[in-house]
Image (spheres, rainbow, N blue to C red):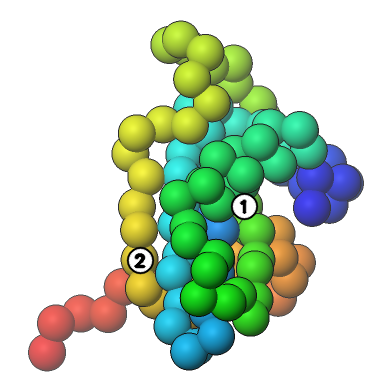
Amino acid sequence: MASRLARAGLFARTVTVKVRFADFTTRTIARGLGGATDSLDEITSAALTIFDEVDPRPGVRLLGIGVSNFATSAQEKLFGTSRLSTAGRTSRRTNRSSSAECGAEHVLPWRRRRPR
């Protein structure tokens, strides 16, 4: 993942972990990194920190790690040395791919639908 980011000249600001359990329920947790990075060590560390929030005892069918919120340049962390921001989101949505998972050329831009 980090090598694909580097080849594309991109840096990620968000790491996402998706866990699908034996009963097919899915938990997706995303956390901001506090700055953009293409470092495998930072992405791995953030993913492991997120995974600590998940109880794998019910049985895990799928474990996915993705990155998103891309930038074309890295920015140093401005405040403190915390690896993960506290502005993380938890969602129960399924099958949301990031362009880093399947290649930016295969992901269409997301558009908000107007209310009817």
Q: Nearer the viewer, residue 30 or 74?
A: 30
Residue beneath the point at 52% across and 47% down: 52
User: On screen, 87 above or below 28?
Assistant: above
Q: Nearer the viewer, mark 1 or mark 2?
A: 2
Report x, y in % for residue 34: 48, 27
User: On screen, 43 above or below 77?
Assistant: below
User: Residue 79 vs residue 81: left or right?
Assistant: left
Element carrying mark 2: strand
Quarter of the image with the C terminus is bottom left
User: Residue 15 vs residue 40: left or right?
Assistant: left
Quarter occupied by residue 12: top right
Residue at the outermost left position: 116
Report x, y in % for residue 106: 70, 75
Quarter occupied by residue 9: top right
Residue beneath the point at 44% across and 69% down: 27
Residue beneath the point at 46% across and 44% down: 31
Is the residue marked by circle 1 packed among few (<14), some (14-19), or many (20+) residues within 10 Å? Answer: many
Quarter occupied by residue 113: bottom left
User: On screen, 71 above or below 82?
Assistant: below
Residue beneath the point at 35% across and 66% down: 91
Report x, y in % for residue 57: 53, 68
Disc ID at residue 103: none
Q: Nearer the viewer, residue 116 or 1?
A: 1
Mark sitting earlier along the chain (1/2): 1
> Which residue is denoted by mark 2 in the rendering?
91
Say which amino acid is labelled 2.
Ser
User: Residue 114 vs residue 19: left or right?
Assistant: left
Disc ID at residue 67: 1
Say which amino acid is labelled 1.
Val
User: On screen, 3 above or below 59?
Assistant: above
Task: Judge whether residue 112 can be spotted in this image.
Answer: yes
Element carrying mark 1: strand
